[in-house]
C-alpha cells in the first residue's frame, strides 16, 4: 500500500458494553445475549414507554471513569446527556441517550506496539457513555424479530483521532483497547457476541496533501482478523474509485463475511440529522473530585507498566509480553514470583509447560487447578533433587487437572529420584559388566559411548536416577 499515491486515514469508533449488573437507566439485569430468552430482561424504561423516567447507573459511570483515566483522558467534570434522535425498530424511544457536546473524557492517548516493534502513540478524541439498542433478527422468509434485552445496556464509546494508517495499525490499537478494558474488568472483549465492536472510518487523500477525503464507516466486523482485512479491502476499493476519476460516497458499509468484501449499507447521516439536544429527563452529571480519585485508585497496574516491571527483573521482552497479555495470567505469575526468588524459572515453567497444558486441556489459568504456591512447592522438590525435571513436568500435568499437591503426586506415581549411592553403584557395575565389549571400545578411544552408558544406567533406574550421582559413579568406574 505504501507505493500508492494515496495515504489512508483511519479513525476508530469502539463500542464496549459495560459489565454492570443493571442497565444504564433502569434496574433491569444485563443478561447474556445468546442464552437469555428474548425480551426477558425489559421494563417500561428500556422499552421506551412514554412518561417513564431514566436514572443514571452510578456503577456504569465509575467503570467509564476508570476507562477514561486508563486512556489518559482529561475528565469533563460536568457532563450532559443528550438525545440522539433517529428511527429504527431496535430503538423503542426513537432516541438514544448519549453524550455529545460534553463527553466524560477527552484528549486521551494510548501507546501501541506495532508488528515491527515500533511504538506509536494514538490520540483518543473522546470517551463517552451511552446506552445500547435492542437486537434485530431478520427472518429468511421476510419479517424481523426484535429482542430488547440489550436495549439500555450501558455502552461506552471510545473514539480515536484519525491518525491510523493501515489495517494492521487499526488491529493493534483495537487489541490494546480490548486488553485494557479486560484488565479494568469492565468488558469481556467478546467480539463474536458483539459486546466489543470496532468500527473503522476510512478515507484516502493524495500523499503530501492535508484535507481529508470522503470517508466510509465499516460495520459488523466480528474479529480482529476481519478488522484488518476489511480495512485493507476498503482502502483498496476507495483507491480504485479515485483512480477511475470518481468520488468516494460518504456512507456506512458492512463487511460480508462470506464474500470477504464490503457493501453499501446506508448513506451516512450528518450530525445535524440526529437533532441532538440535552436530555430533559436527566440532571447534569457532576463528576466529583472524590469520584475521580476513587476511580484512579481502582485502576490495576496496566499492561505496559507490567511488561516494564517484568523486563526489569530479567524476563525477555517476549516473556514479559505474553505473561502480561492477560491480567489473570500476570496475577498468577506475580503470586508465584512472590514466593520463589527466580522469576525467570517461573516464567519458563509458565510459558513452556503450563501454557501447553492449558492449551491441551482447553482450560484458562483460573479454571486449571495448580495454584502458584503449588508450582513453587514443585520447584522446591526439583531444587532439593527429590525429583528430576522430567518427573516435575509429569507432576504438573496431573496437578493442573486434579489440584493434588506435588508431594502427593510424586508419592503416588513413585517418581522420587533415586539418590541411594549403593543402589546406583550396583546398577553401574551391572551395566558395565554386561557390556564388556563397549567398555573395551570406550577405552580404545570411542569416548562417545559414555552417553550410551548413562542411557543404559538411567533405563535400569526407570529414569529416576540422580543425574549428578550417576555421572560421578560412572566416571569412577570408567
Ligand atoms: P461520527 O461518525 O459519529 O460522525 P466523528 O466525527 O466523531 O463521528 O468521527 C468518527 C471517527 O472517524 C473518528 O475516529 C475520527 O477520527 C474519524 N474520522 C473523521 N474524519 C475522518 C476521515 N476523513 N477519514 C477517516 N477517519 C475520519
Ligand atoms: Zn429496563
Ligand atoms: Mg461514526
Image (spheres, rainbow, N blue to C red):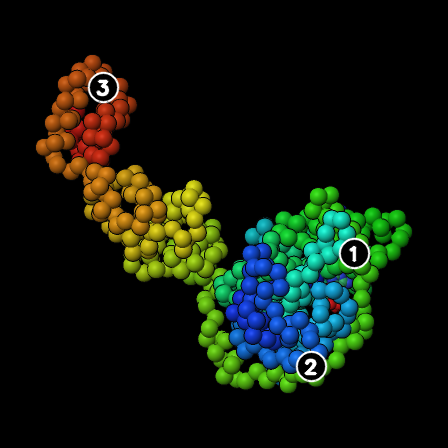
Find numbered disc 3 in the image and state the secondary structure of the residue it sits on: helix
Q: Is residue 426 above or below residue 91?
A: above
- Furthest toward the right, the residue is 245
Does the beta carbon at disc 3 come under 8 Å from ligand 1?
no
Q: Mark 2 and mark 1: span between their CA atoms?
A: 34 Å
Q: Is residue 229 left or right of residue 400?
A: right
What residue does disc 1 label?
265
How far across and down, in percent of the image, does residue 447 sit?
26, 22
Front of the two marks 3 and 2: 2
The one nearer the camera, 150 or 44, is 44
Q: Is residue 317 left or right of residue 98?
A: left
Q: Is residue 14 above or below residue 167?
A: below
Residue under the point 47% across and 57% down = 326
Q: Quadrant of residue 143?
A: bottom right
Chain-order first, disc 3 or disc 1: 1
Q: Quadrant of residue 412?
A: top left
How far across and down, in percent of the image, does residue 448 sit?
28, 23
The one nearer the camera, 120 or 33, is 33
Does the beta carbon at disc 2 come under 8 Å from ligand 2?
no
Would you call the spot at circle 1 few (<14 residues within 10 Å), some (14-19), or many (20 or more)? some
Quarter of the image containing the C terminus?
top left
Amino acid at each position: 500500500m505504501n507505493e500508492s499515491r494515496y495515504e489512508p486515514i483511519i479513525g476508530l469508533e469502539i463500542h464496549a458494553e459495560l459489565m454492570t449488573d443493571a442497565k444504564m437507566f433502569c434496574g433491569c439485569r444485563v443478561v447474556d445475549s445468546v442464552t437469555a430468552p428474548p425480551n426477558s430482561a425489559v421494563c417500561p424504561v428500556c422499552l421506551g414507554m412514554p412518561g417513564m423516567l431514566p436514572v443514571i447507573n452510578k456503577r456504569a459511570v465509575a467503570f467509564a471513569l476508570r476507562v477514561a483515566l486508563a486512556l489518559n483522558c482529561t475528565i469533563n467534570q460536568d457532563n450532559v446527556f443528550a438525545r440522539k434522535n433517529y428511527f429504527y425498530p431496535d430503538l423503542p424511544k426513537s432516541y438514544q441517550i448519549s453524550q455529545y457536546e460534553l463527553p466524560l473524557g477527552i484528549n486521551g492517548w494510548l501507546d501501541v506496539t506495532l508488528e515491527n516493534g515500533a511504538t506509536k502513540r494514538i490520540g483518543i478524541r473522546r470517551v463517552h457513555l451511552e446506552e445500547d439498542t435492542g437486537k434485530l433478527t431478520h427472518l429468511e422468509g421476510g419479517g424481523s424479530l426484535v429482542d430488547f434485552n440489550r436495549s439500555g445496556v450501558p455502552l461506552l464509546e471510545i473514539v480515536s483521532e484519525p491518525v491510523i494508517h493501515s489495517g494492521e495499525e487499526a488491529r493493534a490499537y483495537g487489541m490494546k483497547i480490548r486488553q485494557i478494558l479486560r484488565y479494568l474488568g469492565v468488558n469481556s472483549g467478546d467480539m463474536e457476541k458483539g459486546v466489543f465492536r470496532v468500527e473503522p472510518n476510512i478515507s484516502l487523500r493524495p500523499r503530501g496533501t492535508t484535507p481529508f477525503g470522503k470517508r466510509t464507516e465499516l460495520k459488523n466486523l466480528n474479529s480482529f482478523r476481519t478488522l484488518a482485512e476489511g480495512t485493507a479491502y476498503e482502502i483498496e476499493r476507495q483507491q480504485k474509485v479515485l483512480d477511475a476519476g470518481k468520488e468516494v460516497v460518504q456512507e456506512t458499509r458492512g463487511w460480508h463475511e462470506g464474500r470477504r468484501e464490503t457493501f453499501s449499507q446506508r448513506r451516512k447521516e450528518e450530525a445535524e440529522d440526529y437533532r441532538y439536544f440535552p436530555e430533559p429527563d436527566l440532571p447534569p452529571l457532576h463528576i466529583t473530585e472524590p469520584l475521580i480519585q476513587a476511580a484512579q485508585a481502582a485502576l490495576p497496574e496496566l499492561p505496559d507498566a507490567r511488561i516494564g516491571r517484568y523486563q526489569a527483573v530479567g524476563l525477555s521482552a517476549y516473556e514479559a509480553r505474553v505473561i502480561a497479555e492477560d491480567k489473570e495470567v500476570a496475577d498468577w505469575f506475580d503470586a508465584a514470583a512472590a514466593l520463589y526468588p527466580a522469576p525467570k524459572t517461573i516464567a519458563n515453567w509458565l510459558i513452556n509447560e503450563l501454557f501447553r497444558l492449558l492449551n491441551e486441556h482447553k482450560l484458562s489459568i483460573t479454571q486449571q487447578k495448580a495454584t502458584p504456591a503449588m508450582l513453587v512447592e514443585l520447584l522446591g522438590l526439583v531444587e532439593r533433587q527429590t525429583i528430576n525435571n522430567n518427573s516435575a513436568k509429569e507432576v504438573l500435568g496431573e496437578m493442573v487437572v486434579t489440584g493434588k499437591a506435588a508431594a502427593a503426586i510424586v508419592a503416588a506415581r513413585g517418581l522420587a529420584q533415586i539418590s541411594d549411592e549403593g543402589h546406583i553403584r550396583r546398577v553401574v557395575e551391572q551395566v558395565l559388566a554386561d557390556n564388556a565389549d563397549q567398555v573395551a571400545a570406550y577405552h580404545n578411544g570411542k569416548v562417545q559411548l559414555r552417553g550410551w552408558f548413562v542411557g543404559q544406567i538411567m533405563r535400569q533406574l526407570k529414569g529416576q536416577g540422580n543425574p549428578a550421582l550417576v555421572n560421578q559413579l560412572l566416571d569412577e568406574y570408567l
